[in-house]
Image: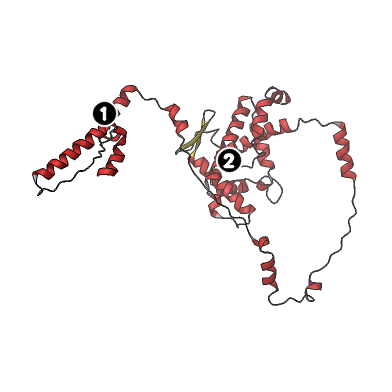
């Protein structure tokens, strides 16, 4: 077994670094049999993790957390996306480790499996021996048959072999072992004095508004910094442009179909000097007005930049 670990040390290091061992009785079952009917949530090393298997693992994890918290846990935490991802990731890691173990010839013989199950205290009767009745009662309570249960136990034993072969092949310097030995032999004497609060509480007299005064003088101690959780998506043109390929013909076609978006209406700006003459005025008045306009036009031809001054003077 040690030679096996040495030959595959790097692979086992990577796998064991992300897997918590040993496992309980209930591990991944479908590696040794066809995947359960239903959708496939993941494929690992040529085998599938079914929706039924994932849901069972999720229920086991939820029940474990409920027991650890004594039933006082937010139900939303037990069915959050983070919880589901963690369970699926655990299944994938277990499947990878099992695949590597089988690939390297790690097996459990029927005799080893039988001995492990028969020695489990949960299946012992009052006489301390294996009880078939208790075994069958246990299987019935877990809603599984003997073949499924034994396959799961076989997987756990294979994983334990992989873990023990690696973890139990450590070396420790003499200086470290001697230091640990000295630490275990050390002794400490501790003395303590207990000052009961009840002994002094009766002698404390507070004014009716003492609590309000203390709060007003120490408001910073009761403040919690404001927090904001923001989720956003960044749409970066710099990241999208390299992925876009536009043919010259496409650009020309789009322009032809959307010319109105790129056109600007024609505009003109006109300025004039008005020499007014009433409609009812005689011909001599109109002639004088025309002569004045011709005179101004002649001046403007001589000095085109003087239009503004002429407009102020005559219009």
Residue beneath the point at 39% across and 25% down: 245
Name the residue carrying label 1. Answer: 256
Looking at the picture, tell me which residue is in the foreground, 303 or 106: 303
Residue 130 shows in this picture: yes
Q: CA distance from mark 2 to mark 1?
A: 72 Å
Q: Is residue 15 left or right of residue 50?
A: right
Q: How many marks?
A: 2
In the image, what residue occupies the spot 49% across and 44% down? 232
**Position of 50 compared to 64: left or right?**
left
Choose top left, top right, bottom left or bottom right for residue 72: bottom right
Instruction: Check disc 1 and report its element: helix, strand or loop.
Output: helix
Label the magenta part by its dominant secondary structure: loop
Residue 7: x and y in percent read 69, 22
Pick the residue in front: 257 or 134: 257
Please identify the quarter of the rendering in which residue 90 is found.
top right
Badge 2 marks a residue whose secondary structure is helix
Looking at the rendering, the stretch of residues picked out in magenta corresponds to 192-199
Q: Which residue is mark 2?
A: 149
Q: Quadrant of the C terminus?
A: top left
């Amino acid at each position: 077994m040690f030679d096996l670990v040495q030959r595959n040390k790097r692979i086992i290091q990577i796998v064991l670094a992300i897997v918590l061992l040993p496992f309980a009785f209930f591990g991944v079952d479908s590696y040794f049999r066809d995947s359960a009917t239903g959708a496939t949530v993941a494929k690992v090393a040529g085998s599938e993790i079914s929706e039924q298997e994932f849901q069972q693992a999720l229920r086991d994890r939820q029940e474990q957390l409920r027991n650890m918290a004594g039933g006082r846990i937010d139900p939303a935490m037990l069915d959050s996306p983070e919880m589901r991802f963690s369970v699926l990731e655990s299944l994938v890691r277990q499947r990878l480790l099992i695949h590597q173990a089988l690939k390297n010839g790690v097996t459990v013989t029927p005799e080893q499996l039988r001995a492990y199950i028969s020695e489990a205290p949960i299946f012992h009767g009052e006489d301390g021996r294996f009880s078939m009745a208790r075994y069958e009662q246990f299987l019935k309570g877990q809603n599984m048959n003997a073949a499924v249960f034994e396959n799961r136990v076989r997987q756990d034993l294979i994983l334990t072999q992989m873990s023990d072969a690696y973890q139990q092949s450590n070396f420790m310097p003499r200086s470290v072992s001697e230091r640990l030995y000295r630490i275990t032999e050390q002794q400490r004497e501790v003395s303590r004095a207990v000052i009961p609060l009840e002994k002094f509480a009766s002698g404390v007299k507070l004014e009716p508004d003492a609590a309000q005064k203390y709060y007003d003088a120490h408001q910073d101690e009761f403040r919690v910094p404001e927090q904001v959780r923001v989720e956003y998506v960044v749409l970066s043109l710099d990241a999208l442009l390299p992925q876009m390929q536009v043919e010259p013909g496409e650009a020309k076609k789009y322009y032809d179909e959307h010319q109105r978006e790129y056109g600007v209406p024609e505009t003109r700006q006109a300025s004039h000097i008005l020499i007014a003459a009433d409609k009812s005025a005689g011909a001599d008045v109109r002639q004088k007005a025309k002569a004045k306009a011709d005179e101004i036009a002649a001046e403007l031809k001589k000095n085109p930049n003087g239009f503004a001054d002429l407009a102020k003077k005559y219009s």
